[in-house]
Image: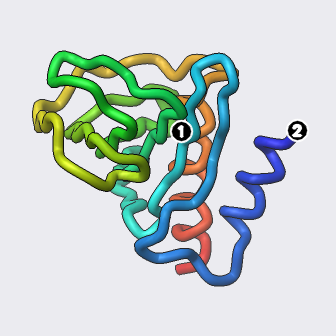
């Protein structure tokens, strides 16, 4: 219910937060918080591209080293309910700050959006925000 309220506020807000990270979801089990940059939501048919950021409460070990945050450029298939990462950058600091630990720009494989996941919350924001922008035109 909380997630639905957050998504509704994001989608229906009269003034989008351009260039700012907007809270989407917190998971206590993974100790992370997910944010989106609403100014990066771009729709092309059923596909939506959007940047999101994951901020970890404790450092995570990755192939590139320890990170406290990761920015991801993700593409969402609204009709097919799936997503794929297009670029990924890990940072030593929180909220995408500090030294860059790694960066990849390889488009990944499509993956299904899992119910009750952070990916699902992000998919909802991407697809519903893009749909609202389409309706406003």
Q: Position of residue 73 (x, y in %)?
A: 29, 45
Element type where label 1 sits in the image: helix
Q: Is residue 83 left or right of residue 28?
A: left
Q: Earlier in the sequence, mark 1 or mark 2?
A: 2
Task: Say few, some or many: other residues with alpha carbon within 10 Å of mark 1 (under 14 / 14 to 19 / 20 or more).
Answer: many
Element type where label 2 sits in the image: loop
> Where, by quadrant of the figure, is residue 46 drawn?
top left
Task: Say few, some or many: other residues with alpha carbon within 10 Å of mark 2 (under 14 / 14 to 19 / 20 or more).
Answer: few
Q: Which mark is residue 33?
A: none
Q: How is the image coloured?
A: rainbow
Foreground residue, 93 or 14?
Answer: 93
Where does the N terminus fall, quadrant-wise? Answer: top right
Residue at horizontal 69 percent and vertical 82 percent from the top: 14
Q: Which mark is residue 1?
A: 2
Which residue bears the numbered disc 1? 123
Residue at horizontal 66 percent and vertical 17 percent from the top: 29
> Which dot, 1 or 2, sits closer to the camera?
2
Q: Is residue 77 above or below residue 11?
A: above
Q: Position of residue 100 (x, y in %)?
A: 17, 45
Q: Position of residue 7 (x, y in %)?
A: 71, 52
Q: Is residue 55 left or right of residue 14?
A: left
Q: Position of residue 6 (x, y in %)?
A: 75, 53
Q: Is residue 95 above or below residue 110?
A: below
Q: Is residue 62 left or right of residue 124?
A: left
């Amino acid at each position: 219910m909380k997630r639905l309220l957050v998504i509704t506020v994001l989608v229906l807000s009269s003034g989008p937060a351009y260039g700012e990270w907007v809270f989407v979801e917190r998971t206590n089990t993974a100790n992370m918080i997910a944010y989106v940059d609403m100014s990066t939501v771009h729709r092309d048919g059923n596909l939506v591209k959007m940047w999101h950021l994951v901020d970890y409460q404790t450092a995570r070990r990755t192939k590139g080293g320890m990170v406290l945050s990761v920015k991801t450029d993700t593409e969402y298939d609204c009709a097919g309910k799936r997503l794929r990462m297009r670029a990924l950058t890990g940072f030593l600091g929180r909220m995408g700050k500090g030294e860059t630990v790694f960066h990849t720009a390889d488009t990944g494989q499509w993956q299904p959006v899992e119910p009750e996941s952070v990916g699902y919350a992000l998919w909802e924001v991407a697809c519903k925000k893009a749909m609202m922008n389409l309706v406003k035109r």
